[in-house]
Image: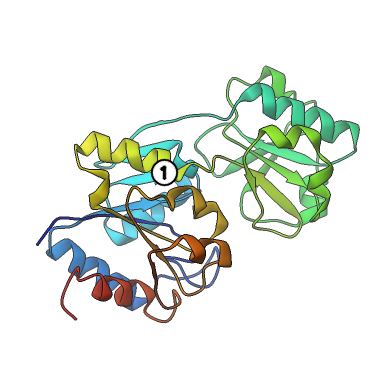
């Protein structure tokens, strides 16, 4: 059988039930079958590499495109993570300060965001990341910024002029993420590292943050629970993540016999 290189988003694709959800048994079974058939399996997530590691380990994966395409892990070893453009992030934070908008930043591969005061937690009650208060936090003095988090209800973000130069996506009603949205770039880096043709890749996704990896370079599978925009770009639309979506897609693609 032709070897294929499969890249899976986590949330809403491998993982059902939200950020603290579960991987359906049928998805785990499909992944084992794919490995038995000799296919290459890789996570492709917007999550920070350390935040995705538990899922990579649970599934027995060794490879990952993380941080929205800016991080690469090969054979269990993180090769590096590219930061955001610090100048553009600092401009956004200055605008937020001028408008009284709470913010936080992620400066390393960890589960902690830095915030200048308690307002971020007070206004969001968010538990996705830990918050470490650094009084007088000055982003200009930080070496690197990997992600930023801006407390702003939809559609107020449209009024932030500095945001126009940055990639961002909203997962929470209370705030949005400023993070890389170039999964295709990370997938190409992985395929180049492996010396594999792009046409042998298959990507699986569900959200608008997966739009960048839905290119004509490879086959694209949208989950049944995917956004309308992603489904429009898909070569195949499978069933929902919690309705055997991964298994059904693999069978329809002929990656293994049911």
Furthest toward the right, the residue is 99
Q: Nearer the viewer, residue 251 or 118?
A: 251
Q: Nearer the viewer, residue 130 or 16?
A: 16
**Residue drawn at 24 percent across, 34 percent down:** 193
Residue 156 relative to residue 196: left or right: right
Q: Is residue 188 visible?
A: yes
In the rendered image, the quadrant that contains the C terminus is bottom left
In the rendered image, the quadrant that contains the N terminus is bottom left
Q: Is residue 163 above or below residue 37?
A: above
Q: Position of residue 133 (x, y in %)?
A: 73, 37
For label 1, the SS is: helix
**Residue drawn at 30 percent across, 70 percent down:** 28
Q: Is residue 115 visible?
A: no
Residue 124 relative to residue 130: left or right: right
Q: On the image, which quarter does residue 27 sit in?
A: bottom left
User: Label 1, on which residue?
Assistant: 184
Applied colour scheme: rainbow
Q: Is residue 30 above or below residue 192?
A: below
**Residue drawn at 65 percent across, 46 percent down:** 177
Q: Nearer the viewer, residue 127 or 253?
A: 253
Q: Position of residue 164 (x, y in %)?
A: 72, 36
């Amino acid at each position: 059988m032709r070897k294929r290189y499969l890249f899976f988003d986590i949330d809403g694709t491998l993982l059902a039930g939200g950020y603290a959800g579960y991987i359906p048994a049928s998805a785990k079974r499909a992944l084992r079958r794919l490995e038995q058939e000799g296919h290459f399996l890789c996570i492709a997530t917007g999550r920070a590499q350390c935040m995705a590691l538990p899922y990579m380990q649970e599934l027995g994966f060794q490879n990952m495109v993380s941080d929205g395409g800016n991080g690469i892990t090969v054979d269990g070893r993180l090769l590096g993570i590219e930061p955001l453009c610090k100048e553009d992030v600092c401009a956004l934070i200055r605008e937020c300060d001028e408008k009284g908008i709470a913010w936080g930043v992620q400066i390393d591969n960890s589960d902690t965001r830095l915030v200048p005061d308690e307002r971020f937690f007070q206004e969001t009650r968010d538990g996705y990341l830990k918050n470490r208060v650094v009084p007088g936090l000055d982003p200009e003095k930080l070496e690197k910024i990997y992600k930023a988090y801006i407390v702003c209800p939809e559609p107020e973000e449209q009024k932030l002029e500095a945001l126009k130069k940055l990639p961002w996506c909203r997962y929470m009603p209370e705030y949005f993420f400023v993070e890389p949205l170039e999964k295709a770039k990370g997938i190409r880096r992985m395929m180049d590292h492996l010396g594999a043709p792009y046409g042998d890749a298959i990507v699986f996704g569900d959200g608008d943050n997966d739009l960048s990896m839905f290119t004509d370079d490879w086959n694209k599978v949208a989950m049944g629970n995917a956004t309308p925009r992603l489904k429009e770009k898909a070569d195949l639309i499978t069933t929902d993540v919690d309705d055997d979506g991964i298994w059904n897609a693999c069978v329809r693609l002929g990656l293994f016999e049911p």
